């Protein structure tokens, strides 16, 4: 019997939070190394990323690698009154931050850009499967933002989930509004599902 999304979220979040600090750091560094060799990452200049929370794989080593390579990092900003739930704002290494309603830091100032202005979007997930399906936290912010670009499929940047390898499951329950991933990067490497031929 297939588990519900809520049950899967609960189980995977518990596993994720059970990692030691050393395990988290090693995984984050290995993920950054894989990304640094990835054509998707190397070719991107404007990258959407996120601050890790709730045991998510740490994005700090990856953001540092991006800045060292001269790339720009943009973080999601909640848009409760906007046409889509998320916009993105440039994040500098020492830029001012403010917490959103979930306690997640967002850049406090600067011009907002839409997702189609980015070259690559790295996004969090709770679980993923071999079909490129993503289980998020349940708010639907990313899915609704990317679904708004369905009529502009060619303008949607590659969507790469960041996760620990153990977050991969054989199959996930899928709803019609779920937007599939281009690929997933973990501490074990990068797996592409569509639109990229990423060979390390």
Image: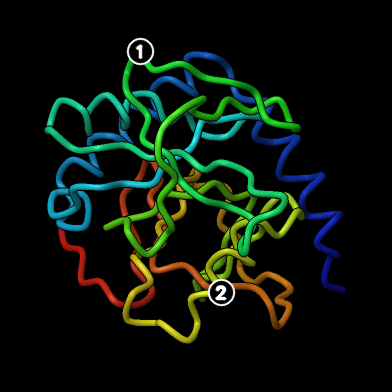
Q: Quadrant of the C terminus?
A: bottom left
The furthest residue to the bottom:
151
Q: CA distance from mark 2 to mark 1?
A: 32 Å
Q: Quadrant of residue 121?
A: bottom left
Identify the residue at horizontal 18%, vertical 47% (top origin): 45
Instruction: Give the position of the N terminus as an image quadrant.
Output: bottom right
Kindly state the secondary structure of the residue where label 2 is placed.
Answer: loop
Disc 2: CA contacts within 10 A as few (<14), some (14-19) or many (>=20): some
In terms of secondary structure, where does tag 1 sit?
A: loop
Relative to residue 95, is residue 45 drawn left or right? Answer: left
Closer to the camera in the image, 192 or 112: 112
Whole-percent x, y for residue 144 in the image: 64, 67
Q: Which mark is residue 148?
A: 2
Q: Height in image: 162 above or below 149?
A: above
Q: Is residue 108 above or below residue 147?
A: above
Q: Which residue is mark 1?
A: 94
Image point 48% across, 37% down: which residue?
50
N-term mark: 2 or 1: 1
The image's colour scheme reads: rainbow
The number of discs equals 2
Query: Where does residue 43 sit, x and y in percent of width and height?
Result: 13, 55
Nearer to me, 20 or 122: 122
């Amino acid at each position: 019997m297939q588990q519900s999304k809520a049950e899967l979220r609960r189980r995977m979040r518990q596993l994720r939070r059970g990692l030691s600090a050393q395990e988290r750091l090693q995984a984050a560094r290995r993920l950054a190394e894989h990304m640094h060799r990835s054509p998707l990452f190397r070719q991107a200049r404007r990258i959407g990323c996120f601050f890790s929370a709730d045991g998510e794989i740490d994005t700090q080593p990856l953001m540092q690698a991006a800045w060292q390579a001269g790339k720009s990092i943009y973080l999601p900003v909640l848009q409760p009154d906007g046409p889509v739930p998320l916009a993105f704002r440039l994040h500098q290494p020492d830029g001012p931050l403010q917490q959103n309603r979930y306690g997640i830091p967002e850049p406090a100032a600067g011009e907002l850009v839409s997702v189609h202005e980015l070259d690559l979007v790295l996004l969090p997930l709770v679980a993923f499967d071999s079909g490129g399906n993503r289980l998020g936290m349940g708010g639907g912010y990313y899915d609704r933002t990317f679904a708004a670009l369905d009529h502009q499929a060619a303008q949607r940047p590659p969507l790469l989930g960041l996760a620990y390898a153990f977050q991969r499951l054989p199959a996930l329950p899928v709803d019609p509004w779920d937007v599939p991933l281009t690929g997933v990067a973990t501490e074990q490497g990068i797996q592409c599902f569509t639109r990229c031929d990423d060979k390390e």
